Image (spheres, rainbow, N blue to C red):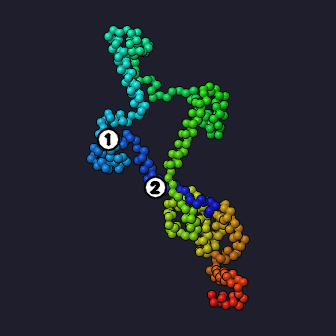
Amino acid sequence: MKKYLKLKIRIPKAEEQKEEVKREKTKELVTLAKKIEKAVELHEKGVLRTQICNELNINSRTLNKFLAMSQSEREKTLKSKTQKRHEDTVRRKEEMVQCVREMYQNGFSQRRISRELNLEWKTVKKYLDPDFNSVHKMYGRKKKSILDGYHETIEHLLREGLKCREIEEQLRQKGYSGSSSLIRMHISKVKRRKQESYINQYKAVSYDFLSRNHIIKLLYKPLKDIKGLTQEMYTQFQLHYPKAAGIIELISEFKDILKSSAINLLEPWIQKAQALDSDEISSFVNGVQRDKNAVVNAIMLPYSNGLAEGKINKLKTIKRVMYGRCSFDTLKTKVLLLK
């Protein structure tokens, strides 16, 4: 068992425990927008503020701030820095467009407007167009890259274990004419994305840890008598460590054969033990087959040489304690007195 198992055995938690962990993580990942919406909803229903704080995992100051906000203030709070920066840019541009149009309606020429506002005359002409839109046409859209057509090739080469310089050489042979830094940046993003995916996948599974001694005790005791080991944990152990679980089951079956004197089960047990492909178990099976008649008699008959073996062991212990310090007569006397 020590050969197949580490000192600490890691097994995934049972399904009901996984669901609990999943619910807790889902609670942690609630967005700010959802928290604000839920807080307002619960407050309107008359739920106590303490209960709202506990449910949404926020403190009382944050809750009071949420409830004191108007709808427009909430929307503004939820906007990202990019959105805010873009809205400020659009607002300033619209003010400039309005100024250009007012000056043009008041008789200013396009050239004079250009001088007064320090704008290109083409920009003035564009602002005077009634179809002009202050929002940039590329806002929210990803710009095309010269590397777009090579993404699949890069990922394929990364899976083959090629380094950045080798990947660049392959891409240039295929017609890539961009910079080396663009390739390095994209490779870094791909690696970071895979690493984050692996970490998230690893965190998504929660684990229990078993002591190897708990599993070894199953060779001698029933599961119910082992503290710290539940049926659910052992079921998960069987799923993820089938060979070690097979050894435990095999030993348990052999003990049942001895206790029940079921000699007809010995041969199927030997075949099952050989199929397990364990060196230690195979060595034991070879010993059983070499002395099969004795094993069959041990299973069938109620007799045991355990008493004789015990007496011999006791006699040897006494002899070793007395060795070199007494005669045979003294040893004989001590053995008889200690019987």
In this view, the mark in front (1 or 2): 1
Q: In this view of the protein, can residue 308 be seen by the observer?
A: no
Q: Amino acid at mark 2?
A: Gln
Residue at label 2? 17
**Residue 92 occupies quadrant:** top left
Residue drawn at x 57%, y 39% as measured from the top left: 191
**Residue 220 occupies quadrant:** bottom right
**Residue 243 occupies quadrant:** bottom right
Q: Amino acid at mark 1?
A: Lys
Task: Say whether disc 1 or disc 2 marks the residue closer to the N-terminus.
Answer: 2
| 247 to 63, vertically: above or below | below
User: Circle 1 — which element?
Assistant: helix
Which quadrant would the C terminus be assigned to in this image? bottom right
Q: Residue furthest front?
A: 325
Residue drawn at x 55%, y 56% as measured from the top left: 10
- Along the line of sight, the residue nearer the viewer: 327 or 146: 327
| 74 to 51, vertically: above or below | above
User: Circle 2 — which element?
Assistant: helix
| 74 to 214, vertically: above or below | above
In the displayed structure image, the side of residue 90 where residue 276 appears, left or right = right
Residue drawn at x 65%, y 33% as measured from the top left: 165
Label 1 neighbourhood size at 10 Å, few (<14), some (14-19), many (20+)?
few
Label 2 neighbourhood size at 10 Å, few (<14), some (14-19), many (20+)?
few
- Residue 211 in the image: state x and y as whole percent: 55, 62
| 101 to 303, vertically: above or below | above
- Along the line of sight, the residue nearer the viewer: 145 or 102: 102
Residue drawn at x 56%, y 29% as measured from the top left: 148
Q: In this view of the protein, can residue 329 be seen by the observer?
A: yes
Mark 1 → mark 2, Cα distance in angstroms? 35 Å
- Residue 198 in the image: state x and y as whole percent: 54, 45
Residue at label 1? 65
